[in-house]
Amino acid sequence: MGNVIATTIKNVISWFKNLNLKTNVSKTKMLHFRNYNAQKSDIVIDTGDSIIESVPYAKFLGIVIDEHLNWKKHIEMLVNRLSSFCYALRSLSYISTNRACLQSYFAFFQSRVLYGLAVWGGSVHIENIFLLQKRCVRILAGLKSNRESCRESFIKLKIHTITALYVIELCKLIKRYPAKFLSRVQGPSNRLNEKFKYDLEVPQSRTATYSRSVKLAAIKVFNNLPEELKALQGTKFFNGLKEYLLVNCPYSINEFCNLNK
């Protein structure tokens, strides 16, 4: 296997060279995706000029991808950046207006959280980011105690929880790529029950990894929306979705799924 990969990489480097493109092999890393119980690969990739290092995680386009795809490393990196902002926000709150602090939150906290959220938002480690988000909301709302609930402050400040942002990003995928998501009346189950007419078809999950996929997560959250909301299209759908999530302020996916029951 190592020889096949090495040969392929050499061919790619040669192809780039013929196009007058230079490949920086020193920045190339090998990442072996595996289950927790699978042995780590001992493959050595020798391109002739250098050996490609095998790493447990790597940063790609601003997102840290690890060998188990549990997004722990990415969230750790994000937590470090967001923690620094929380400290800066508290300092800013002493010398600036509430409006300026709120604008800073959206510019430096929420914008970073939204990047790639649909991919890594289902990780169990996302709770660490939610704790920082609640810290920001307490600062913005002027709450003194960490024991004081900030749910009402989320609503008052018109800030969506990390769970609500995750739901919105998943729904964006559904609306952006409708051909990837069949309705139940289009799918093999052909359920014509009035209650489910706007629901999406749930594909059969054959592996535990697929059951945690972004596609199934998107279908799950969409099917748990109120029927009148699922029936909306375009801007009306997203406006209604944002208002629904803001008013109900879900703290977790389980809480979100129980809203419509």
Image (tube, grey):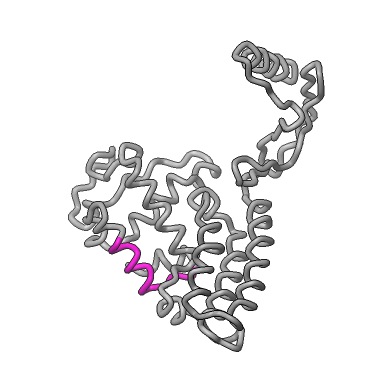
Q: Main secondary structure of the magenta part?
A: helix
| Residue at 61% across, 46% down | 62
Name above or below for residue 128 compared with residue 49.
below
What percent of the width, then of the height, locates residue 13? 67, 17
Where, quadrant-wise, is the C terminus in this rendering? bottom left
Give the quadrant of residue 28: top right
What percent of the width, then of the height, locates residue 109? 55, 64
Q: Is residue 208 left or right of residue 181?
A: right
| Residue at 35% across, 46% down | 174
Q: Is residue 14 left or right of residue 220?
A: right
Residue 245 forms part of the magenta stretch: yes
Residue 63 forms part of the magenta stretch: no
Give the quadrant of residue 255: bottom left
Name above or below for residue 243 compared with residue 169.
below
Name above or below for residue 95 compared with residue 195.
below
| Residue at 55% across, 43% down | 209
What percent of the width, then of the height, locates residue 22? 67, 21
Between 236 and 26, the one nearer to me in the picture: 26
Residue found farthest to the top: 18
In the image, the segment drawn in magenta is: 239-251
Where, quadrant-wise, is the N terminus in this rendering? top right
| Residue at 28% across, 42% down | 189
Figure disc tally: 0
Between 161 and 60, the one nearer to me in the picture: 60
